[in-house]
Image: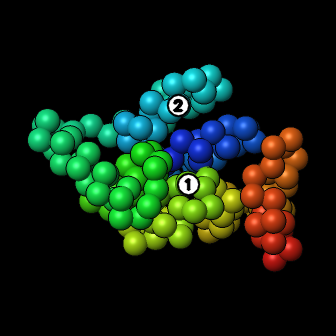
């Protein structure tokens, strides 16, 4: 499986010390230019980025210009000012044809669902179970990690997932 990943997804997986799960789930992890730029100050993710994240490269200047035009159009169309979100969506649907885009953003599914399958990091456990990497107990422990941080990730949503498990 291949994915395009957003900054917040890498950042949150780093915060809960679960970055190593991503390359177990995805054979290739791509990141567009805006994500790579946003990750510059994230020291805790540097080794992961250098080892596993594949920067999106454009064969020609024309391809880069086309990509940027598509990104700007998408930003206007879906009403977002988040450049990285739009780059992930465009790279996912039109350039890399990845299996899914991975976000840590509650609005991503709502705004960007037309651009292909999206997975919120809170739902990564589903793929981990499907691939036999996680047991149900592992999934519960994974979700609980989001609730143990001082700044919790999507508390109500994560708690609803835990109730279902």
Q: Horizontal and vertical percent for residue 161?
A: 78, 70
Q: Residue at x 75, y 58 (%)?
A: 154
Dot 1: what SS? Answer: strand
Checking the image for residue 133, the label placed there is: none
Kindly identify the residue that appears in the image at 59 percent across and 47 percent down: 9
Residue 57 percent coordinates (x, y): 27, 37
Q: Quadrant of residue 46?
A: top right
The answer to whether 25 is drawn above or below residue 61 in the figure is below
Q: Quadrant of the C terminus?
A: bottom right
**Residue depicted at x 38% and y 56%:** 75
Label 1 CA crowd tier, 10 Å (few <14, some 14–19, many 20+): many
Of 100 and 79, nearer the camera is 79
Location of residue 69 in the rendering, given as x and y in whole percent from the top left corner:
23, 50
Vertical arrangement, residue 123 with respect to residue 12, above or below: below
Would you say 143 lies left or right of 56 here? right
The answer to which of marks 1 and 2 sits earlier in the sequence is 2
Residue 28 appears anywhere in the view: no
Name the mark on residue 103.
Answer: 1
98 sits to left or right of 11: left
Query: What quarter of the picture does the N terminus occupy?
Result: bottom left
Label count reads: 2
Q: Secondary structure beneath disc 2?
A: helix
Q: Which residue is mark 2?
A: 39
Q: Nearer the viewer, residue 85 or 97?
A: 85
Q: Residue at x 31, y 51 (%)?
A: 72
């Amino acid at each position: 499986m291949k994915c395009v990943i957003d900054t917040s997804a890498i950042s949150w997986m780093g915060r809960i010390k679960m970055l190593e799960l991503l390359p177990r789930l995805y054979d290739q992890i791509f990141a567009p230019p805006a994500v790579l730029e946003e990750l510059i100050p994230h020291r805790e993710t540097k080794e992961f980025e250098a080892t596993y994240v594949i920067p999106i490269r454009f064969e020609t200047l024309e391809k880069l210009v086309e990509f940027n035009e598509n990104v700007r159009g998408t930003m206007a169309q879906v009403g977002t000012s988040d450049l990285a979100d739009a780059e992930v969506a465009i790279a996912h649907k039109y350039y890399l044809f990845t299996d899914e885009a991975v976000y840590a953003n509650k609005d991503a599914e709502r705004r960007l669902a037309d651009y292909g399958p999206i997975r919120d990091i809170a739902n990564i456990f589903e793929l981990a179970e499907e691939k036999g990497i996680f047991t149900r107990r592992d999934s519960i422990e994974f979700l609980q990690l989001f609730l143990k941080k001082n700044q919790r990730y999507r508390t109500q949503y994560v708690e609803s997932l835990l109730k279902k498990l």
